[in-house]
Amino acid sequence: MNANGITAAVGEPRPRVEGRLKVTGSAAYVADVPMPDLAHGWMVTATVSRGRIRDIDATDALAMPGVLGVLDHRNARRLNPDAAHHFGPDRGLPMLQDDAVPYAGRPIALVVARTPEQARAAASALRVTYDAEPHDTEFSMNHPAARPASTLFGPEADTGDLEAELAVSTVVVDEVYRTPEENHSAMEPHVATAWWEDGHLYALDSNQGPFSISQVMAMLFFIDRDRVHIRAEHVGGGFGAKTICGAQIILAAMAAEHFRRPVRVALTRRQVFLAIGSRPPTEQRVRIGAGADGRLRAVHHHAAFALSPLAEYIEWCTEQARTLYAAPAIRTELSAVPLDRLPPCTMRGPGATPGSFAFESAVDEVAERLRIDPLRLRLLNQPAASPVSGRPWSTRRLITCLEEGARRFGWAQRDPRPRLRREGNLLVGTGVAAAAFVAGVFPASATIAAETDGTFSVRVGASDIGTGARTALIAVAADALGVSTERIRLHIGDSDLGPNPGAGGSRGTTSCAFAVTEAAKALREKLDDPARPVTVTVDTTPLINWRPAEERNTYSAVFAEVTVDPATGEVRVRRLLGMFAVGRVINPLLARSQLIGGMIGGLSMALHEESVRDPITGRLVTADFAGYHISAHADVPNVEADFVADYEPQDPSGFNGLGEIGNAGVAAAIANAVWHATGTRHRTLPISLGRVVETAAPRDRQEAISAV
Amino acid sequence: MREFAYQRTTQIRDALSSVARHDGARFLAGGTNLVDLMKAGVESPARLVDIRSLALGGISESPDGGLVLGATATNSAVAADPLVRRRYPALSQAILAGASGQLRNMATVGGNLLQRTRCAYFADPSEPCNKRAPGSGCSALGGAHHNHAILGWTEHCVATHPSDMAVPLTAFDAVVRYETLDGPGEVPLSEFYLPVGDRPDRETALPDRALITAVVVPAAEVAGKSRYRKVRERASYAFATVSVAAALDVQDGVVRDVRLALGGVASRPWRARLAESALRGGPVTAERISAAADLEVAAAEPLRDNGYKVTLARNLIEAVLTDLAASSGAASGGAAGNGAAGAGEESDG
Ligand SMILES: Cc1cc2nc3c(=O)[nH]c(=O)nc-3n(C[C@H](O)[C@H](O)[C@H](O)COP(=O)(O)OP(=O)(O)OC[C@H]3O[C@@H](n4cnc5c(N)ncnc54)[C@H](O)[C@@H]3O)c2cc1C
Ligand code: SF4
């Protein structure tokens, strides 16, 4: 309780403030917002993996009812070829500019009509012909086009004498791990409604960061950012797929200008699969050398991922190798392989999620070969400071996560030998994995006004894509102002609310909380002034320490129990426990829900998710939920997520982000459990039944028969 | 989706003559498959004749003790029917292992039999596909065919039939009854789906524009001891990778009758007659079950990427028969079945 008798809101398990609106269907998502004089655009995508458009014959389409026109490279306005986003210039952003087809699924036309049905019907009457060119979509880390990845996130690690340490290691694990292309599959497909007024562009867009999208759109359309106004009030999930400026808003804005009226472009599920970036496939070689005492001596993680020549991208798989364990020699390498594929896009836990699958599987293999308990091996190699930079940790409660998780999971009773536990026809096994995820804040601005009625209007360009950011920021604002949450009026999801990083990099809520806290501090100093409203704005850019003395991460330990039917290859996860160190928790109810959601994402990645491309045409074959399998309810067991006490000293309130740490680690824990159950290592995801089914029928079936 | 006329009728004759009179007219039952394919542009009927108001929704006993399943009886109704559950448990289990509760409430007996393949190339009009566009080629043959056929395919089409319900119906020698303007007819389910040959677009022996009126399941004592087991890429809500419907009647350690059919392996439910005859009349032992399973899959010709299905089909035949043998043993005081496998498919699809 504070001096005014107000109970602190931070730390309280409060339900989402917009929960009622959402469950009653009254929360207005982009496509729900009515708009007078609205026209509808239907996106048409390329069906070849590389080539040129020979012709788009729109004769029939234009004659169809309700059709206003067709936009393609022959009549579309020019867009800025140098437009860029956070990874740098992206030549995929300017759409409908020329006849080149850089990947299958590339938007090549927009059919605009009075109703979506008319637009769709006309789009299917469009006759597109191509001059196909040979394409290359086959990913491998040994591809001749492989090259070092961008070092935008900093240089890769290289400490100690790797080869010398490997040479003196008692065991050396040297294996290759693979993860497939994956799709974010947010519930709400991408949709935007755009219109122009007096040289200003307005858009409602389903995205994860209206401010950064407004920056990209301003660049693309050669206008000042102040003339771009983008709102995203409610967003039905993103998982990274809405951090980019999507085809829907670019095409809607082009069409709105061309047809001089508001245009909505709503993608179908299939179009999201085809045209919105996915997590790229990875291939990762991990070499780890260890002594007989279980001490790691050498760690080498070389990860490669696919991207498009259109834009730079980083799938930073090597984070775990430089953070989790101490070793005298650590080398990481990251390669990018440009292919004629859909450009990738960050997907929840980018890098860390596929990277931790490879790295924490390899660590488990070290334990296996040394015949050491894998939990013990992990505890044995905990570094006092960053093994690469030598900097201390700002906070690191990973040991507590591992030990407390082990206690709750009942790890002490575990026999480390594989394939020993049977229940009927099923093999049972358990596995563990650790994970780290880099934490921090990005610049953001917040404005708070003390209103005449005693309420406080808090304006911050945050995005709530279902995370509970809105609810969390109300609590943060209330505590920072020393008032009850009822007096906070929060406004988010609007590019006019000032610079904001949006929901991404696990930094949306922490970045906004920082800005809100600082603005509240500044406002409280002015509250003695009786004039109302009093307004302050704080931008955290100058307040952020970009070179902190300590390394800042969040951590987790994940434990899994699986059953495997070797006769059918069916793997079921029976228990999943995650212990998390994520700083001070703003709202344990919502945080837990975030982490459980992330863990289910990890489970789904481990066992089910895989985008399959045709080996001949390079086109996506699994462009719907019948082909792209996500875990169903029946696959999701009792999932537990809990926190260890933690406080982030680099944050004024002790917070860290937790949006992505939930995904990392889970696939490795499950893969390690499958090994423990079956004795077989699965180094390629997903661990689907075709990979697990065993040729030899289990012999114990005879017992049942012979007794008949 | 192209515009279409919609019509609802209560008379079989009206439905038949309407479909006969209008080019491109189709029967609409639950619509769970047809409407999806219309949205995807795979089907574009000019007229839909809704048959759900016809008096074809009943489930009744036939004079010989078998069952007559009306063509528009919903999948949910068939699965929940007490007679079905008692006399043909594998049929009930198979239906419940498919789709979702909502879909089963809409889907019908006739529509289920006539649902089209889930081959992804078939569902995408921008891809070559002999089944959708005869002569355009089979994209799956050299493409992504991880979940395609291992038995009975030709280079013209390697798709599988997706129905769960049709698998036990095939094992139980069901017969499809239909009506045409020229009068009624019937065809055994074992001859209902045509061999693939070079015309995969021709899928069934149903006469053009015929209306399925019922599926008749003959009485069979063995069917009471039946089980359906479906293996799929996730725990529920996915089509079968491989499924097995099996019935086993063991008296004094000897197989009196056995029925076996596989789903997910061919262009039609695959009646495993080789395995059946290897087992019928002989003692039920692990070796014989194993040998029968081997025999049935010996003819399999896996594609480049679906060899695992041969192993899976083999193991699944063995597992289900073993469970049935064990539970028939338990009934006569023998060893208990293995709880881990078995009829665990009673839950939601
Ligand atoms: C998401 C999803 C998941 C599914 N999962 C499964 C699964 O796991 N297992 C499974 O077996 N199935 C599954 N299905 C398929 C489902 O079982 C079929 O769609 C359903 O059984 C079709 O029945 P219907 O009555 O809706 O047919 P409709 O869609 O109405 O018709 C299908 C076809 O049959 C024709 N037709 C219908 N009735 C008659 C009749 N009496 N006489 C002549 N022609 C007729 C129609 O003209 C049409 O061509 C799934 C479907 C969906 C959408
Ligand atoms: S397998 Fe059959 S349905 Fe699939 S693409 Fe080939 S012809 Fe078409």
Image (cartoon, coloured by chain):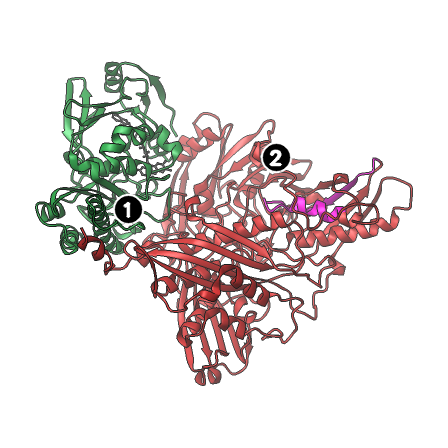
Chain colours: A red, B green
* Quadrant (top left, top right, bottom left, bottom right) of the N terminus of chain B: top left
Residue at 35%, 32% in the rendered image: B104
Residue at the extreme front: B333
**Mark 1 belongs to chain:** B
* For residue B241, above or below residue A383: above
Q: Amino acid at mark 2?
A: Arg
Q: Is residue A487 above or below residue A305?
A: above
Q: Is residue A125 visible?
A: no
Measured from the top left, where is residue A365 in percent x and y?
Answer: 42, 71
In the rendered structure, find residue A20 and report the number of the disc placed on it: 2
| Along the viewing direction, whichever of A306 and A122 lies nearer the viewer | A306
Taking the image as shown, residue A167 lies to the left or right of residue B282, namely: right
Please tell me whether residue A641 is drawn above or below residue B65 in the rendered image. Answer: below
Quadrant hosting residue A177:
bottom left
Q: Quadrant of ligand 1?
A: top left
Q: Which residues are magenta?
A: A453-478
The foreground one among A174 and A410 is: A410
Q: Residue at x 32, y 32 (%)?
A: B43
Q: Nearer the viewer, residue A47 or A528?
A: A528
Is residue B221 located in the magenta-colored stretch of the structure?
A: no
